[in-house]
Image (cartoon, rainbow, N blue to C red):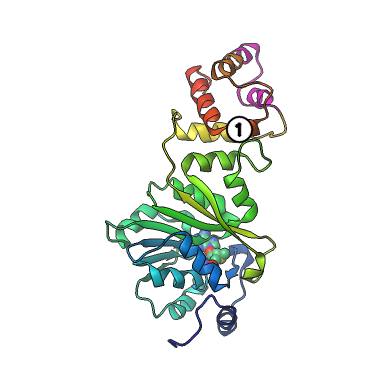
Amino acid sequence: MNNSAPEIGSPARTNAILTRYRLVAKKSLGQNFLSDLNILRNIVNAAEVTEDDNVIEIGPGIGALTEQIAKRARKVVAFEIDENLLPVLDETLADYDNVKIINQDILKANLAEVIHEEFEPGHPVKLVANLPYYITTPILMGVLQSGVAFDEIVVMMQKEVADRLVAEPGTKAYGSLSVVMQYKAHVAVAFEVPRTAFIPQPNVDSAIIRLTPREPLPVKPYEEEALFKFVKGCFIHRRKTLWNNLQGLFGKQPEVRERLESVLDTVGVSRQLRPERLTLINFIELTNAFHNEGLM
Ligand code: SAM
């Protein structure tokens, strides 16, 4: 390994690696390589990675972000689905003995098991990644439902999706993804990244999202899955009123409508509201009330 080589995430080195391995970025796997050392370092800064931390990465690509994490962390375990990138990573990360690459689809990985096998206990576990954008939502849902209590999650995604994750009630971007994510974690945008920072350039801008454990909610749903299903159901027709959506979900029979009305009265939510006006607490209270009413 040439120790004097520029870091992987510099444009010159990225281009050299792509040329040397005759790599053509696979659109189908969301391969856009981040090629800006300041941004790469700022992602690691946003996660406050220290030498005490164990880090999971998703989609190391040619190793640009992996290298910046490896310089700071105790150990990095990175999941890469594309086996053509394995020999590349072998070479680009040869100087780092605290990196392990797992050639697996992250959606099929058992994160809890890998963490148990690969990381010494007693150290913070963080997730830092430039996500493959075509599966951002399933990855985040999988991570949040993996049972792993990550101390910090810092991930890059398409800006439009990031906007939806942090959206407040009453805004255009607010929808089921906002409610479900905000139920699971405290969500904030760390900073935005222009499309020009990638090779090849994607057609969208990006943003870094930081997910941290959220403060406990004043009410809990009787069942998480029921809450998620209900929230998704309420946004099926987001331009219609809540009342219309509820009748679509539960039925229009007079006796059902009567019970729906009684639940809305109890919870104190107006029939005429659009679903985008409801807060997370409204959704939880409605889920519990419909359950108590025997409607779900
Ligand atoms: N981390 C690199 C960077 O910042 O330049 C590459 C990020 S690129 C946006 C996404 C990476 O995720 C690619 O390397 C791609 O091959 C990988 N990938 C795509 N689908 C995946 C999956 N299901 N499981 C694991 N890795 C995946």
Span of residues in magenta? 241-258
Picture coordinates of residue 143, whole percent (x, y):
45, 50
Instruction: Indicate whether 9 appears above or below 255.
Output: below
Q: Main secondary structure of the magenta part?
A: helix
> Three-letter amino acid code at disc 1?
Gly
Which residue corresponds to the image point at 40% horizontal and 80% vertical from the top-left? 94
Quarter of the view holding residue 100: bottom left
Instruction: Report the front residue among 228 and 169.
Output: 169
Picture coordinates of residue 167, whole percent (x, y):
61, 43
State whether residue 60 appears in this view. Answer: no
Picture coordinates of residue 37, whole percent (x, y):
54, 73
Which residue corresponds to the image point at 46% horizontal and 34% vertical from the top-left? 224
Instruction: Indicate whether 181 appears above or below 115.
Output: above
Q: Is residue 160 left or right of residue 47?
A: right
Instruction: Report the front residue among 116 and 274.
Output: 274
Q: Is residue 239 left or right of residue 3?
A: right
Q: Is 243 within the magenta?
A: yes
Q: Is residue 17 left or right of residue 153?
A: right
Which residue corresponds to the image point at 66% horizontal and 69% vertical from the top-left? 196
Residue labelled with disc 1: 233
Instruction: Report the front residue among 94 and 126.
Output: 126
Picture coordinates of residue 147, whole percent (x, y):
38, 46
